[in-house]
Image: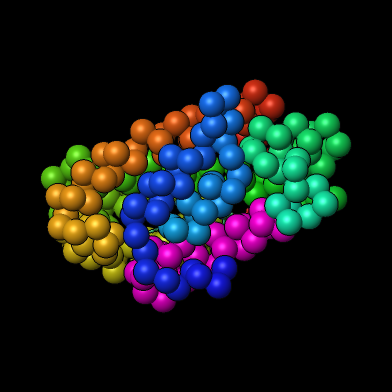
Amino acid sequence: MADEQADFNLKVVLISFKQCLNEKEEVLMDPYITGWKGLVRFLNNLGTIFSFISKDVIAKIQIMERFRSSDQKDHYSSLQAMVQYEMDNKLVDLQKRSEHPDSGCRTILRLHRALHWLQMFLEGLRTSQEDATSVLCTDSYNTTLANYHPWLIRKAVTVAFCTLPSRNAFLETMNVGPPEEAVEMLNEAMPFICQVYQITQKLFEEHSLLDLP
Ligand SMILES: CCCCCCCC/C=C\CCCCCCCC(=O)N[C@@H](COP(=O)(O)O)[C@H](O)/C=C/CCCCCCCCCCCCC
């Protein structure tokens, strides 16, 4: 994660999520990881109050990067390959976190839930007249990720959201020009992010992996 401090550019994230899907509608791991790294860059630009969040995302990215540089790397080339491999070889803790506390499946599930938050948040940013990003962020968090977080994290997150800039200032930090151009790019990015989310959701649902401890 040496490049995590570099400037955020929305285009890089957009391209990564676009590249995630192959012709068989599999979600490819490397662009998925690259997309998340881009989002961490954005988070780091928002100030140190968000660092407890970026640390958690970085830890999860690193788990997945370790799989991708291990002897088993080919089994982690896509989310579909990972699920097949970990399930066939009983490498996932299904009831209680014990023998395989950091399986690829449970790690991706956390990022996948966060992608749902991102989808809701970007939808709000794109379409809502609300000028306070903190309101958009809180609303999308409460309907998605908050359901999986304990009280203390929910409180800390809500405090951090209060420091977010206004909608236009927020869109300008995406480094793609004026707010209108950022919205334009979000319009372009949304279908890819939604597709990655839906395909992953279906995959995890089919294998009863949506509640991994
Ligand atoms: C196109 C770009 C524009 C928008 C850019 C937004 C950038 C957002 C970047 C990252 C999103 C945050 C992802 C958070 C992942 C959280 C994963 C998680 O749920 N982890 C918890 C469970 O893990 P385990 O303990 O079971 O291993 C963990 O306990 C949580 C720790 C920290 C708190 C996470 C809070 C998440 C809040 C999400 C909102 C981010 C706010 C961004 C502000 C724009």
Main secondary structure found in the magenta portion: helix
Q: Where does the image place residue 56, in percent across and percent down from the top left?
A: 56, 63
| 98 sits left or right of 42 in the view | right
In the image shown, does 135 or 74 lie closer to the viewer? 74
Q: Where does the image place residue 177, in percent across and percent down from the top left?
A: 19, 59
Q: For the C terminus, which image quadrant?
A: top right
| 98 sits left or right of 180 in the view | right
Q: Residue at x 69, y 27 (%)?
A: 207
Q: Residue at x 83, y 31 (%)?
A: 88
Question: Up-down: is 183 above or below 176?
Answer: above
Q: Residue at x 43, y 57 (%)?
A: 39
Q: Residue at x 41, y 51 (%)?
A: 13
| 189 sits left or right of 149 in the view | left
Is-magenta flag for residue 65? yes
Q: Where does the image place residue 15, in percent across and percent down from the top left?
A: 41, 46
Question: Up-down: is 182 above or below 109?
Answer: below
Q: Which residues are magenta?
A: 40-66
Question: Up-down: is 165 above or below 92?
Answer: below
In the image shown, does 32 or 207 lie closer to the viewer? 32
Q: Where does the image place residue 123, in percent across and percent down from the top left?
A: 29, 40
User: Residue 132's image quarter?
Assistant: bottom left
Q: How many marks?
A: 0
Q: Is residue 89 visible?
A: yes
User: Residue 168's image quarter?
Assistant: bottom left
Residue at the limit of the structure toward the bottom, as seen here: 48
Is-magenta flag for residue 129? no
